[in-house]
Amino acid sequence: MAATAFVAQTFISKLIPLKYIAVVAVILLLLGLAFWFLLFSKRINKFNRAFGVFLTVVLAISMVVGNVYLYSTYSALGSIASDDDKEIGISIVVLKDSRYKTIEDLDGQPFGRATNLPDTNVDKVQEELSQTYSDTLEMKNYESVNDFADALYNKEVEAILLNEGSRGLFDEKHPKFNEETRVIKTFKYTEEAVNIAKPVDVTKDPFVMYVSGIDTYGSVQTVSRTDVNMLLAVNPNTHQILIVSIPRDYYVAQTCQGDALDKLTHTGIFGIDCSVSTLENFFGMDINYYGRVNFSSLVDIVDALGGITVNSPVAFSGGEYSFVAGENHINGNEALAFVRERYSLSGGDNDRVKNQARVISGIIDKATSPSILTGYVGLMNSLSNSFQLNMTSDELSSLVQMQLNDMKGWKINQVSVSGSGETNWSPANGFNSYVMRPNMDTVEYAKELIQKVLNGEIIDESQL
């Protein structure tokens, strides 16, 4: 029964190549006949019959374990491969020491909202408040995040309507905003995801994937700034992947802000489709798929792997953690600190994106090592809750099947685009902010390398 269930699961999951399924089925059939002979033949003595019982139990347990592994993988791929809806939270925020505890307490008190980022969900909350307070609602509009926050601190308003996706915008002018305020209530809204995939046969055709890491904990569907930005050029024919790292503060024309120049990280506030279309325009190429993670994702995945090893070229500190020059064995929280730190690195954001690629390499190395078997189910569970990818489950399964079919290794190279820091206008902030002016020579070279990978040329490390 267990063997039958295992073979059935291999067909359902579409993960195992047919040639392997056929071999396994034949082996299981022969083993079944052998065990039947050991158990029921009159010519077998008691010792061999007992040995047959033992082998049958071992085979049954192996099939059950195999089923668990296959089911965990299939279930995880199904959860990952989805264009999940966007989750938006609009919070009513007051100062931490405010005497107001509930929405009812705020009746008759002035509210504030930012108008530099038009937001239909904030409009919905304002409408709900209008109905709650009838004629007593006073809403004041502010044209920048700075004025918006200052109004709360200066008691011009007693509460503000904050899109949680833009909470990180306060970091520059009010770095302790989270500690100095509290949320009275959060209104949750869901927006249907738009399918922006440009499908190809991922086992035969090269493709480009955008990897976005958003600056929040909790649900990966939450809309927020995108702190990690990478383009992956993947060629399944040459088994080559090129990782192109892009600084979060890259000053680029944004499709969701009327092509106004702003930090790349701010595209995440508008959703993954804005990030993808902005990068497509900037690099002049199609992006076929995207993958999306957040702070919780990275912590959970690294911990599920039992930690990873990263090689840092220099010693530095990030938050409460310190890293040495050379190999560092790090857990999930340390990995998060490793990829977020930039102030103690001489190259700032240019060095940070290189560290992000080092962590990605560390995850791949650990995930493909034999030690992964002990924590495999935990890793699959972690991925199913922590990673969002707009490939279909069939596309993912076909990639797994292709890898098992040819068992070839992948050549992974990494390159970063760079730029120079300056102060310039940020429409999302509504004031002048630190931005990074792109070094277009590095951008053009990255584009050349991407095209070479897509064309099937092998990138030599001397070219990086």
Image (tube, rainbow, N blue to C red):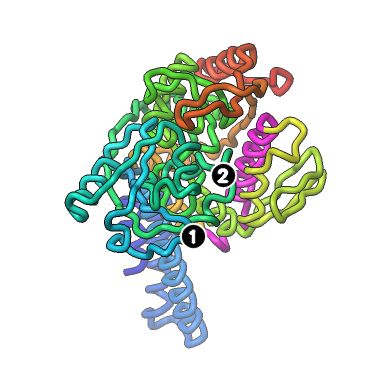
User: 90 or 442: which is nearer to us?
Assistant: 90
User: What residue would you read off at disc 1?
Assistant: 96
Label 2 element class = loop
Q: Of the residues shown, which amino acid type is indicated by label 1?
A: Lys
Residue beneath the point at 51% across and 57% down? 379
Quarter of the view holding residue 348: top right
- Residue 256 spot, x, y in % from top left: 37, 25
- Residue 227 spot, x, y in % from top left: 54, 38
Can residue 335 be spotted in the picture?
Answer: yes
Query: How many numbered dots are placed on residues in this image?
Result: 2
Residue beneath the point at 43% across and 22% down? 254
User: What residue would you read off at disc 2?
Assistant: 174
Location of residue 440 with respect to 45 vertically, above or below = above
Residue beneath the point at 38% across and 83% down? 42
Name the image quarter holding the C terminus: top right
Residue beneath the point at 36% across and 55% down? 75
Label 1 element class = loop
Can residue 221 be spotted in the picture?
Answer: no
Q: Is residue 135 left or right of residue 182?
A: left
Q: Which residues are magenta?
A: 349-378
